[in-house]
Image (cartoon, rainbow, N blue to C red):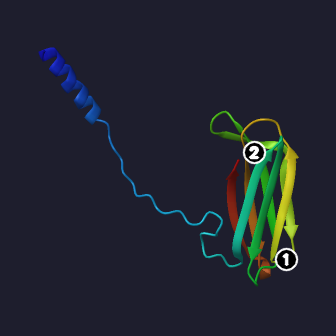
Amino acid sequence: MKKLCLLIALILMIGSAVPVYAYEIEDDPEPDEPVEPYSYVLSTDASFNVLNDTAYIMARYTGNSGATGATIEITLQKRFLLFWWNDVEDGHWTDTFTTSSGASNHSLAVSSGTYRVVINYKVYGSGGAYDEISKIVNQ
């Protein structure tokens, strides 16, 4: 009986020696709204779906009255192993706009797997200044 009590006490001591960390979780802002006070961007939006072995990607932006144009750069990536991603061949697009709002739509035939898109928005104002927003949209 003493051996059993010692074994239980040893297990409890080892189990209680594990450090515990606590941290505060902050509320996330709306996922499609700019987080910082941008000079030219009112909103950005993106969608990504894979249906019948075809990837469909949409990215759009809306600028304020000071926006003079934008570029939207889209990169399609496929999961490689557990945490790594590779760019998909022919899965990179850059669209340029000369208006205060615009949208990019692209599609590409894909094989089976897990995909995501990385989208970089640059919304320009007068004098060459711009706001930059990056998003990752998972399948």
| Residue 46 image position (x, y, % from top left) | 73, 60
Q: Quadrant of residue 115?
A: top right
**Disc sitting over residue 12 in the figure:** none
Q: Quadrant of residue 66?
A: bottom right
Q: Is residue 52 above or below residue 98?
A: above
The amino acid marked with disc number 1 is Thr
Q: Secondary structure at mark 1?
A: loop
Nearer the observer, 135 or 4: 4
Judging by the rendered image, the residue that carries numbered circle 1 is 99
Q: Is residue 128 left or right of residue 108?
A: left
Q: Are marks 2 and 1 in contact (CB under 8 Å)?
A: no
- At x 63%, y 39%, the residue is 83
Q: Secondary structure at mark 2?
A: strand
- At x 78%, y 62%, the residue is 59
Q: CA distance from mark 2 to mark 1?
A: 28 Å
| Residue 71 image position (x, y, % from top left) | 81, 66
Q: Is residue 126 above or below residue 62?
A: below
Nearer the observer, 95 or 52: 52
Q: Is residue 37 above or below residue 9?
A: below
The amino acid marked with disc number 2 is Gln
- At x 81%, y 79%, the residue is 68
Mark 2 crowdedness (10 Å alpha carbons): few <14, some 14-19, many ≥20:
many
Furthest toward the front, the residue is 52
- At x 68%, y 58%, the residue is 135
| Residue 57 image position (x, y, % from top left) | 80, 54
Mark 1 crowdedness (10 Å alpha carbons): few <14, some 14-19, many ≥20:
some
Q: Quadrant of residue 104?
A: bottom right
**Disc sitting over residue 77 in the figure:** 2
